[in-house]
Image (spheres, helix red, strand yellow):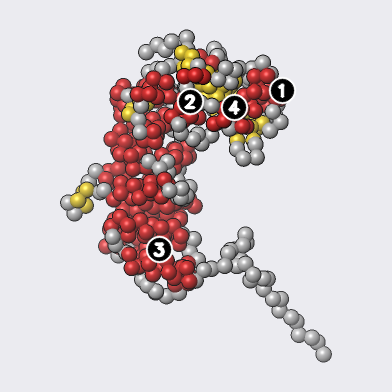
């Protein structure tokens, strides 16, 4: 549907955003750009969150100044990105991202080169606009107007702008109304939007889960139809998005939306197929319960590591895989290692889980067998294992969700308190251990 180019202006008296709620560093940037004669808006998720009474995680600025002009204006500026050329302004306690208004449609032919500005000298010449054969935008550095930039954004609720000149809200696409209705809706045709950037499908699910909103009907229909295309995004980017999805504090709701939409099975085909089956006549519901448990920890302000998240998500699946291998004659530790290696081999081309993270997942799961043998041989050495802390938290989840392993967990928690190891230095030496003595030569007579 066509979007109006005449914006709705919401004056300061009709909205709740105050400058006292905005980062002082973002305000400095907005005012310096304004004083330099540039247009400058606060835009995106920070405006959305401020209107909802939520505390923004970061603040983004958009302007008509080019990246080179921004770099000349701010000494603390670093230009980053090839797909979208952005300016990162570094302050002591935060980084503010400043982008230049993007054009709705590129004026030049695909692949035409853009000469770097003097401030960008030393950077290679890149195409200003580049699209893959599937229609995914690979590079987009064609600058435009505020209206065009708004129409290039993903969802209406993320397209609201705060104008520092009169403290008003600028709304080109009905984002304020969708915010009041609690709706996630793409700007323009949802199929075209998801084709241009498949990761927008994950963002739609994340915003719906995080804000408690519903996905608008045509947007949801396009998301379901295009879910298999999510793998067109790069595997490293999808890994980062998965962490955002499930460490948001609404991981269980995110999981349910992803299962319904088909995104989950597209990203994790082996695990998705296993979830569709039953084990001993029972459906697999543990992953949902584990994510609920995880959400409570995140909501309480606790930091959850990526390996622990993945161990909880994939644990039951990998434990069952390892049990099959043990039935074929594998030793317990070898079975866990083989199951994790097989899973990562299938998964990394789709979602690039780093090798070091996968190895800690393996340690968390392998340690469960060792922890059940109390005290066992050399329990002190178990405390020094790399994944011990996360392995105990993993067992804590199992204990709380299933009521099992309570005595084992209590024993190891008490043992860890009573046998605190000294901190490990940068070179892996125990603090206070000192250097090994040099052997003295025997004195010649």
Q: CA distance from mark 4 to mark 1?
A: 19 Å
Nearer mark to the viewer, of 2 and 1: 2
Crowd tier of the residue under label 3, counting other residues whose Cα lies within 10 Å: few below 14, some 14–19, many 20 or above: many
Identify the residue position indicated by label 2 in the image.
Answer: 16
- Quadrant (top left, top right, bottom left, bottom right) of the N terminus: top left
Q: Which one is nearer the viewer's eye here, 123 or 28?
A: 28
Residue 397: x %, y % from top left = 35, 56
**Which of the two discs, 2 and 3, labels the residue nearer the N terminus?**
2
Quick check: 356 above or below 14?
below
**Which of the two discs, 2 and 1, labels the residue nearer the N terminus?**
2
Q: CA distance from mark 4 to mark 2?
A: 24 Å
Can residue 48 be seen here?
Answer: no
Identify the residue position indicated by label 3 in the image.
Answer: 367
What secondary structure is found at the residue carrying circle 3?
helix
- Total tally of numbered discs in the picture: 4
Q: In the displayed image of the protein, which residue is found farthest to the left?
A: 281
């Amino acid at each position: 549907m066509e979007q109006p180019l005449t914006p709705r202006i919401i004056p300061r008296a009709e909205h709740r955003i105050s400058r006292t709620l905005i980062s002082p560093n973002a305000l400095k940037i907005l005012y310096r750009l304004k004083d330099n004669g540039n247009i400058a808006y606060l835009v995106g998720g920070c405006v959305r969150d401020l209107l909802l009474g939520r505390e923004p995680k970061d603040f983004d600025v958009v302007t008509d100044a080019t990246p080179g002009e921004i770099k000349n204006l701010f000494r603390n500026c670093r230009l980053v990105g090839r797909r979208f050329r952005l300016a990162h302004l570094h302050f002591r306690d935060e980084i503010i991202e400043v982008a230049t208004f993007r054009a709705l449609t590129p004026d030049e032919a695909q692949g035409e080169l853009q000469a770097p500005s003097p401030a960008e000298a030393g950077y290679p010449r890149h195409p200003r606009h580049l699209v893959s054969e599937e229609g995914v935008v690979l590079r987009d550095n064609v600058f435009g107007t505020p209206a065009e930039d708004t129409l290039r954004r993903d969802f209406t609720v993320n397209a609201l702008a705060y104008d520092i000149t009169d403290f008003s809200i600028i709304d080109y696409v009905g984002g304020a109304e969708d915010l009041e209705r609690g709706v996630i809706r793409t700007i323009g045709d949802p199929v075209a939007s998801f084709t241009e950037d498949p990761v927008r499908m994950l963002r739609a699910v994340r915003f719906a889960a995080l804000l408690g909103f519903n996905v608008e009907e045509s947007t949801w229909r396009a998301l379901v139809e295009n879910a298999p295309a999510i793998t067109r995004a790069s595997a490293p980017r999808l890994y980062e998005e998965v962490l955002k999805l499930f460490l948001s504090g609404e991981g269980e709701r995110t999981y349910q939306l992803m299962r319904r939409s088909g995104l989950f099975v597209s990203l994790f085909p082996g695990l998705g197929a296993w979830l569709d089956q039953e084990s001993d006549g029972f459906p697999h519901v543990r992953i949902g319960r584990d994510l609920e448990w995880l959400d409570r920890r995140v909501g309480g302000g606790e930091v959850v590591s990526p390996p622990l998240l993945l161990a909880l998500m994939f644990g039951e699946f990998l434990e069952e895989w390892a049990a099959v291998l043990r039935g074929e004659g594998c030793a317990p530790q070898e079975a866990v290692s083989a199951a994790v290696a097989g899973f990562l081999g299938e998964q990394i081309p789709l979602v690039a889980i780093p090798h070091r993270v996968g190895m800690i997942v393996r340690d968390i799961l392998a340690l469960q067998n060792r922890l059940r043998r109390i005290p066992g041989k050399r329990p002190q050495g178990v405390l020094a294992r790399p994944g011990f802390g996360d392995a105990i938290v993993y067992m804590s989840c199992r204990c709380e969700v299933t009521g099992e392993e309570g005595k084992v967990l209590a024993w190891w928690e008490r043992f860890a308190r009573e046998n605190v190891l000294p901190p490990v230095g940068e070179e892996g030496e125990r603090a206070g251990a000192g250097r090994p003595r040099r052997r003295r030569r025997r004195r010649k007579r």
